Image (cartoon, grey):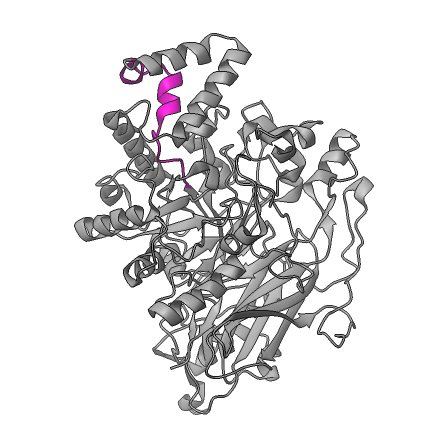
Amino acid sequence: MHKAQWKFHLILKSLMGTATASSLALGTAAVAQEFNTEQSDTEVVLAPDGFSPYAGRNFPQVPLWGDSHLHTMVSVDAGTMTRLSQEDAFRFARGEEVTTTHGLRAKLSRPLDWLVVSDHAEMYGLMPQLLGGDAQILSSPIGKEWYENLTAGDPQIAFETAMEIVASLSGDVPPIDNPKAVKHAWENYTALADQFNEPGVFSAIIGYEYTTEGANNLHRNVLFRDDSVRANQTRPFSQFDSKNPEDLWAYLAEYEARTGGEVLAIAHNGNLSNGRMFSMNAWDGSDLTKEIAEMRARFEPIYEPTQIKGDGEAHPFLSPDDEFADFDTWDASNLNGTELKTPDMLAGEYAREALKRGLKIEQELGVNPFKFGMVGATDAHTGMATAQEDNFFGKHSGVEPEPQRWKHVVIEAPDPDLSIYGWKQAAGGLGAVWAKENTRAAIFDAMMRKETYATTGSRMLVRFFGGYEFTEADAQSRLPADAGYAKGVPMGGNLAVSEDGAAPTFLVAALKDPLSGNLDRIQIVKGWLDAEGETQEKVYNVVWAGDRALDGDGKLPDVGNTVDVANATWTNTIGAAELIGTWQDPDFEANQSAFYYVRVIEIPTPRWTAYEAKRFGVEMDAAVPMITTERAYTSPIWYTPG
């Protein structure tokens, strides 16, 4: 055979970097190779005497799973309850067994690939130093008082003091202002992250959480591409420096300019922000400017729509035609129940509506401040990233597994009706990153190009590509991502404008998590600006399991339900192990801005509450949900007319 017959070209059609995928421990090489792919602007020549369609490639075999939002005893709020350290958090994420604050043994079913220990910036490292009797901390009168109250052995005094410490985070000045102590704690952490960072095996990404307007939850997790050498040239920026997130972005820009480092921020789920997370105005209420919009777009490339404090992808009030919009919904008030939520606030809280608002702002300012990708996280304050339903350890150590935790108060409000009880917690989520390799730099770069997706805890594999040339043959090739990168752009990308105004085509693929339920369906969610400049949305069922047929409104019958609640189990006798297909937008208008993202829905499986009821032999109130439908949300692909 002629050498030319062994030559092929992989054409780079976007600014996105290399990314790959494969199945996750399904036990067969054929399935494992199905999602493999590479993106390159170079020619790959395969030798005829050793032909392999995979030779010459340089990419990881799996998406990298991690948590960008985890707290330990170093956070002031978590440190009043949990006794797990940052080292415990890294060891647990890497697959080691740890002992929890209350003496339980805990371990992940599968290690994570990466972790950000994102302890709060406010009085960073105070609690370990306070409880350890650090001389610098105890030299402050309030530090001495807190230490004595917490160590006196009186549970009631200790609890009241803990609440006082947590409340102090909402003030304008830190009650204990000790820059040397913060510097010491920060440098200890960055050194620990470097110690646990093992390129190719596990990425310990340096980061912290900037916590502002605590009751309204306008928080950001700050992630560094860098190691301790650069990260130690700054310190965590806190709300005591400024409560304005715009000042955080300026601080991050100054860090990059001064050190040559790179940093990003992830706004965490805004479902408790009472409309403030995705406001159409600047932080101070003034008109949004192009400069502010550019700063947000630059430093917040991805968003966390799902975590323990509920799901923030969509809301039934905003998306009444979406039967899957009401999922783990927390919509009664702000975080601590001090301000009731009203319907007009919801549009400023949910990811889908924010993406729509971004299109509108871009039309007015020429910049889209809400052009973000998706990544899930836990926001656990236990030191343990547990997102699996049968292995859920709760928001904080006060609600570790035990018979009555389902009715324990997790977040207390002045009005008991607004308090959050244990059963309301969601066992989620996880972040998946299509990175070139398991290193800090590669994961950071993947986040910057938005080649990420969020799940509510499942480790399903998801691929999503957009272009103009996808055909059904691409979905049957068994190597869909090869076609995806050769013909289009991946999740997080931007569609080129077709010269003839043709509607875009999309290639979607999903493979089940071997430890979770089969797949029900793949949907594509579209948002766009209509001819009048108003935002619209529609959810399309694209690929689904079984012989169901769409009705006249494009809806599918339910997939069914095999959950045995009493025994906390289910059967994978419905649904599909994999779903793959192509889709062309039937409602496309070439002059209208739009975004598209994929939502994958699993069949019903037991919720963590069902496992808890079975494990402890307890009966919970009828209002407590026992069944869940795990899901994934990809980063969007955007279309902007020329």
Question: Can residue 16 be seen in the rendering of this structure?
Answer: no
User: In screen coordinates, is 11 left or right of 612?
Assistant: left
Q: Residue furthest left?
A: 258
Question: Can residue 523 be seen in the rendering of this structure?
Answer: yes
User: What residue span does the magenta drawing correspond to?
Assistant: 117-138
**Residue at (60, 34) in percent of width and height:** 393
User: In screen coordinates, is 422 left or right of 10?
Assistant: right
x then y, percent, for residue 122: 35, 32
Q: In this view, does 582 lie above or below 416?
A: below
**Residue at (63, 58) in percent of width and height:** 26
Quadrant assignment, res 364: bottom left
Q: Which of 298 and 350 is in front in this view?
A: 350
Quadrant assignment, res 470: bottom right
x then y, percent, for residue 462: 56, 63
Q: Which quarter of the rendered picture does the C terminus lie within?
A: bottom left
Q: Which of 157 and 74 is in front in this view?
A: 157
Q: Which of 127 and 230 is in front in this view?
A: 127
x then y, percent, for residue 48: 44, 83
> Is residue 126 on the magenta stretch?
yes
**Residue at (43, 54) in percent of width and height:** 279
User: In screen coordinates, is 533 left or right of 228?
Assistant: right
Q: In this view, does 425 lie above or below 456?
A: above
Q: Is residue 100 above or below residue 427?
A: above
Query: How many numbered circles are shown?
Result: 0
Q: In this view, does 598 lie above or below 417?
A: below
Quadrant assignment, res 608: top right
> Is residue 24 on the magenta stretch?
no
x then y, percent, for residue 542: 65, 73
**Residue at (71, 64) in percent of width and height:** 576
